[in-house]
Amino acid sequence: MLKAAFALIPLMAGYVFISTWLATRYLIKREDSQKLYIRAAFWGLWLFLLAFALSYQIKDSILLELGFFHSLMDSVPFEAKNDKVDTPFWILTLTTTLLIGTFGGYLLNWFYAVWVTPKKKLINIILDRLTGEKNPVLSEVYEHARRDSIKKAINVMNADLELILLRAMEENMPVCVTLGHGKVYVGLITGSIDPGDKRDMLRILPLVSGYRKSDDYKITFTTSYISLYDLCTKGKELDHLDPSKFEIVFPHCEIKSVNLFDINAYNASQSNSNELSNFPPD
């Protein structure tokens, strides 16, 4: 039983660790099962060695406090006396391995979050919190680490679509989405960007929509949602709705192209520069 635990628990700990640690969390989602197994085993081995070192340092103070194990403390690691195995020590080591694997990733995430968050912003949100401002310090700091890790994973995996989407979110720019049947939507990304998400869906808040002509593939915009959103927030006719009710989700398999969209650049490239005059430039 103990031999099986030596193989299973480090592997489990390694898998939980790489699933929660932001440096590997997004990378493993596109890996095949064999590579994922090797990665989990690799990190599980290092976690086991770390747990072994910690357990060896604290075994006397921990195990001697437990009367049930006191009679079994007659051996040392890697030594056997009278063909006996130091069972309490190895149970402590395996338990420590599992604990490090379960919580170690989150701990490293918070260290990384503090490191990548701009120091001025970190000081400001902490001061806001201390002065009573309702600033979600923890979530905002953690979000910096999550986005930075996603960006690195996207670059490593050369995930071109996610790179464009992440850039649009960071610069608060709309994207122009062309679907396979020619329909075009320009809108703001509202869904999360995860390069390993197997759902393969894109969610946006549309600003304008139209279609590409079949002869020259130029875009013709037919519908503007801006005035509709104004009615939701300022008018009385649609005050029971909010703009989020108009979000649209596209499967990646139906998307033909995605690009960043700037209204000023678009109008400058058209013969009729006022085609989207009601579209907000910002």
Image (cartoon, grey):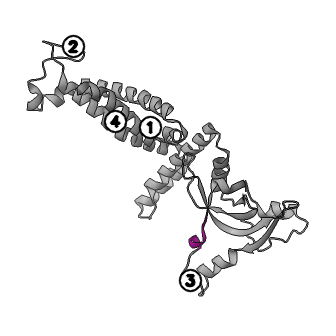
Q: Nearer the viewer, residue 85 or 142?
A: 85
Few, some or many C-alpha atoms within 10 Å of disc 3 (few <14, some 14-19, many ≥20)? few
Query: In the rendered image, which residue does mark 1 sit on?
Result: 18
- Residue 242 screen position, x and y as percent: 56, 75
Label drawn at residue 79: 2
Amino acid at the residue labelled 2: Glu
Is residue 270 shown left or right of residue 200?
Answer: right
**Residues drawn in magenta:** 243-249
* Residue at (42% x, 62% y) in the render: 131
Q: CA distance from mark 3 to mark 4?
A: 51 Å
Quarter the N terminus occupies: top left
**Which SS class for mark 4?**
helix
Q: Nearer the viewer, residue 35 or 82?
A: 35
Is residue 42 shown left or right of residue 120?
Answer: left
Quarter the C terminus occupies: bottom right
If you read the primary sequence from the N terminus, does the residue marked by circle 1 or circle 4 appear first? Answer: 1
Is residue 71 shown left or right of residue 128?
Answer: left
Please identify the quarter of the rendering in which residue 224 is found.
Answer: bottom right
* Residue at (31% x, 37% y) in the render: 99
- Residue 230 screen position, x and y as percent: 64, 79
Few, some or many C-alpha atoms within 10 Å of disc 1 (few <14, some 14-19, many ≥20)? many
Query: In the rendered image, which residue does mark 3 sit on?
Result: 239
Q: Are marks 1 and 3 in contact (CB under 8 Å)?
A: no
